[in-house]
Image: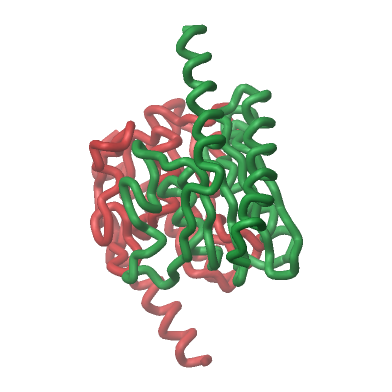
Chain colours: A green, B red
Amino acid sequence: MANEKDDIYYMKIALQQAVIAEKNGEVPVGAAVLLSDGSLHTAHNAPISLNDASAHAEMRAIRAACSATDNYRLPGSTLYVTLEPCCMCAGAMVHARIARVVFGASDAKTGAVESLYQLLSDKRLNHQVQITSGVLGKNCGALLTDFFAKRRRKA
Amino acid sequence: MANEKDDIYYMKIALQQAVIAEKNGEVPVGAAVLLSDGSLHTAHNAPISLNDASAHAEMRAIRAACSATDNYRLPGSTLYVTLEPCCMCAGAMVHARIARVVFGASDAKTGAVESLYQLLSDKRLNHQVQITSGVLGKNCGALLTDFFAKRRRKA
């Protein structure tokens, strides 16, 4: 599972989801949950489109994977996401017992995996998540930088 | 809004939701979001019943309120919940721009408002939430203590 080529393959799929988010006028973040049975559950960021404050890409991918497997926990799964998860999404990963997270760009403002908080390695919580960061980080970050630059020009 | 009598009134409604959760075999936690228009959106904890790791009472109440108002943000709202919110739920409150949270029992193991983390007062995040804790705290806590004691006896 921790194969670098595989990580890049799945991060490219998460990036495709981020592009869909951007086309919908949402902050371009995409995610994919790879379950232990090999099935993949993708999602794009969609809080505005869905009128749902919780509809980050990671949350939607976790909920889709839970629903597909009829299980509120996803042991042995890997979550790929283009941006470092926030507190909400990192918290959901702990609840879902995600085994490993792979993310692209760091988020200095709200990142809760390495930047502001290190929730996934907090031994006080009842589950820890293995972390790989910086996979296609430049591509994932460029998508976000371009999005916010365009938005500023429009404002 | 910060009237003590009102807080007790709405916490009793959240407690009724916690009792529903318990009847469904879920950890007894209940929540209610009071919107600025006076409408109330209640929910009970339901991750196992719904096969959804994210289906805490607070998340479900926030999503219901967002859906009812066709808005991914809930400015001026108060969230009542019987147990101190976790990282996931506190994170969602920041995203939803909840103005105030009122909770009952503290959660020394996973509480992210006062206990393990103080996410809602973190000035590095782009929104802070006003906090009132300990409202009907003994009643809210007793429901949880009884639930886990019964579960241990069954095990």
Res A24 quadrant in image = top right
Nearer the observer, A3 or B104: A3
For the N terminus of chain B, the quadrant is: top left
Taking the spot 45% from the left edge, 35% from the top edge, the residue there is B96
Percent across and percent down for residue B127 are: 32, 33
Indicate whether B118 appears above or below A28: below
Taking the spot 41% from the left edge, 61% from the top edge, the residue there is A120
Answer yes or no: is residue B67 visible. no
Q: Please tell me how many numbered marks the rendered image carries.
A: 0
Nearer the observer, A59 or A29: A29
Nearer the observer, B150 or A125: A125
Indicate whether A48 appears above or below A87: above
Percent across and percent down for residue A155 are: 47, 7
Res B52 quadrant in image = bottom right
Answer yes or no: is residue B31 visible. yes
Residue furthest toward the front? A5
Residue furthest toward the top? A154
Q: Is residue B3 left or right of residue A69?
A: left
Taking the spot 53% from the left edge, 22% from the top edge, the residue there is A147
Indicate whether A94 appears above or below A54: below
Nearer the observer, A89 or B52: A89
Q: Is residue B78 left or right of residue B60?
A: left
Taking the spot 54% from the left edge, 67% from the top edge, the residue there is A99
Q: Is residue A24 left or right of residue B34?
A: right
Percent across and percent down for residue A92 are: 50, 56
Percent across and percent down for residue A151 are: 50, 14
